[in-house]
Image: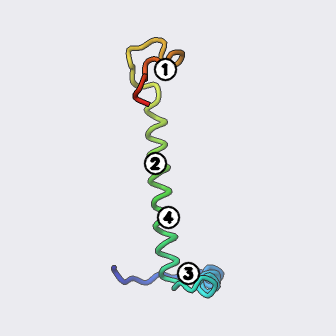
Amino acid sequence: MIRTQIQFEKKAYESLKTKSKETGKSISEIVRKSLDQTIESQETDLKWRRALQSMGKFSSGLNNLAEKHDEHLGDRW
């Protein structure tokens, strides 16, 4: 790990202290976990946006895929 310093507004710091006492976890641990979750959530959102942007941009060559998707996919699912 890399040691660093961050500054909090008083209200945020007080909330962190309360959460720390309630959970028995250090403020550092709470901040690390929260940051990890935020980054993971943003990465997931980015993946979804990319997937949605690609919709309709590729052709399968099948004109009736929406109607007969079960037949086309067969045992693959």
Q: Do the residues labelled 1 and 4 touch (CB within 8 Å)?
A: no
Residue that carries the numbered disc 2 in the rendered image = 46
Please tell me which of labels 4 and 2 falls first in the chain.
Answer: 4
How far is disc 2 from disc 1 in space, using C-alphas?
A: 27 Å
Q: From the viewer's perspective, is the residue at label 4 or at label 3 nearer?
A: 4
Amino acid at the residue labelled 2:
Leu
Residue that carries the numbered disc 4 in the rendered image = 37
Amino acid at the residue labelled 3:
Phe
Amino acid at the residue labelled 4:
Gln
Say which mark, if any, is on residue 69: 1
Q: From the viewer's perspective, is the residue at label 1 or at label 4 nearer?
A: 1
Please tell me which of labels 2 and 1 falls first in the chain.
Answer: 2
Say which mark, if any, is on residue 8: 3
How far is disc 1 from disc 3 in space, using C-alphas?
A: 53 Å
Q: Is residue 42 above or below residue 67?
A: below
Q: Are marks 2 and 1 in contact (CB under 8 Å)?
A: no
Q: Which residue is drawn at 46% across and 17% down?
A: 71
